[in-house]
Image (cartoon, rainbow, N blue to C red):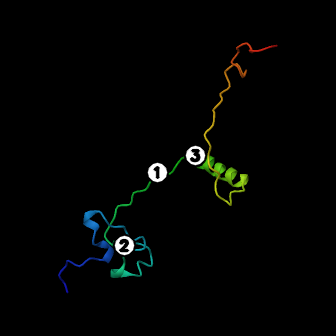
Amino acid sequence: DGSGDELPSKGSALHHANGCKPCLFLNHVVGCKDGRDCSFCHFHHSIKKTPKKSKNKRDRFRKLLANDAEDGDNNGEPRPRQAGLVVRTPVDGSPTGGAAPSGPG
């Protein structure tokens, strides 16, 4: 009708109120097959990319997942983490930190 107020898609209605979700297919080679009937927004959105975790952190996470899977008997689900006591070995390497053992002996 040429009024210029038409939205590019149904999902674009809340764009100016920041209540829309961008159509992920709009900028692909094939484009969005739903066109104006698409329930996602067809206006331009800036893409916010989260920074990638360091390779070291990703590798540690991958190993953790692999260990959880190997521990098994959870039908492929990771086992729940349990709170526990953290024991640190003193600098001298002895479990008592160089203190004399207590008790009979």
| Percent x, y of residue 28 | 44, 73
Residue occupying the point 62% across, 49% down: 80
Crowdedness of circle 1 by 10 Å Cα count: few (<14), some, many (20+)? few
Give the number of the disc on residue 51.
1
| Percent x, y of residue 81 | 62, 46
Query: Does residue 9 appear in the picture of this structure?
Result: no
Crowdedness of circle 2 by 10 Å Cα count: few (<14), some, many (20+)? many
- In three-dimensional space, the C-alpha distance between marks 1 and 3, rounded to whole angstroms, equals 13 Å
Q: What residue did someone put label 3 on?
A: 57
Residue type, mark 1 in image: Pro
Residue occupying the point 66% across, 29% down: 87
Q: Pick whichever of labels 1 and 3 is earlier in the sequence.
A: 1
Q: Pick whichever of labels 2 and 1 is earlier in the sequence.
A: 2
Residue occupying the point 65% across, 51% down: 79
Nearest-to-viewer mark from 2 and 3:
2
| Percent x, y of residue 86 | 63, 32
The image shows residue 32, relative to residue 21, as above or below, that is below
Horizontal relation, residue 67 to residue 15: left or right: right
Tag 3 secondary structure:
helix
Residue type, mark 2 in image: Phe
Crowdedness of circle 3 by 10 Å Cα count: few (<14), some, many (20+)? few
Query: Does residue 38 appear in the picture of this structure?
Result: yes
Q: Pick whichever of labels 2 and 3 is earlier in the sequence.
A: 2
- In three-dimensional space, the C-alpha distance between marks 2 and 3, rounded to whole angstroms, equals 34 Å
* Camera-nearest residue between 89 and 96: 96
Q: Quadrant of residue 3?
A: bottom left
Looking at the rendered structure, the number of numbered marks drawn on it comes to 3
